[in-house]
Amino acid sequence: MNKENPQNPTGKFVPPPSFVKLAMRNMVRKGSQSLSHFALTAFGFGAFILLIAWFARPNLPS
């Protein structure tokens, strides 16, 4: 089956954009909000890793 897209005058089937393309398009459109969410996520992940490392540290006898 050949689905025609009104934005594609050649009539060839064009697959829908991938999730990565859609995510990048949203990130470009939202701009600083995406960067702030990424920064918060990176900070939270770093804090989580440090917390796990703190509680799982080995107890070596002196």
Image (cartoon, helix red, strand yellow):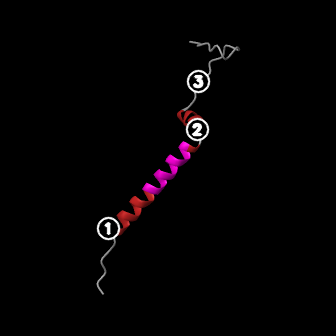
Query: Residue at position x 55%, y 32% from top?
Result: 18
How far is the residue under mark 3 from the one under mark 2? 17 Å
Query: Residue at position x 35%, y 63% from top?
Result: 52
Provide the residue designation for mark 2. 24
The location of residue 57, given as percent across then percent down, is 34, 72
Mark 2 burial class by Cα count in 10 Å: few <14, some 14-19, many 20+: few
The location of residue 10, given as percent across then percent down, is 70, 14
Query: Residue at position x 66%, y 17% from top?
Result: 7
Q: Which amino acid does label 3 sit on?
A: Pro
Q: What residue type is labelled 2?
A: Met
Q: What residue type is labelled 1?
A: Phe
**Span colored in magenta:** 33-44
Mark 1 burial class by Cα count in 10 Å: few <14, some 14-19, many 20+: few
10 with respect to 13 (left or right): right
Q: Residue 27 carries which label?
A: none
Task: Give whichever of 26, 30 is nearer the camera.
Answer: 30
How far is the residue under mark 1 from the one under mark 2? 37 Å
Q: What type of secondary structure mainly makes up the magenta span? A: helix
Mark 3 burial class by Cα count in 10 Å: few <14, some 14-19, many 20+: few
Provide the residue designation for mark 3. 15
Query: Residue at position x 57%, y 25% from top?
Result: 16
- Residue 39 lies in the magenta-colored region: yes
Q: Which mark is residue 55?
A: 1
Q: Circle 3 sits in a helix, a strand or a loop, which is it?
A: loop
Q: In which quarter of the image is residue 32?
A: top right
Q: Circle 1 sits in a helix, a strand or a loop, which is it?
A: helix
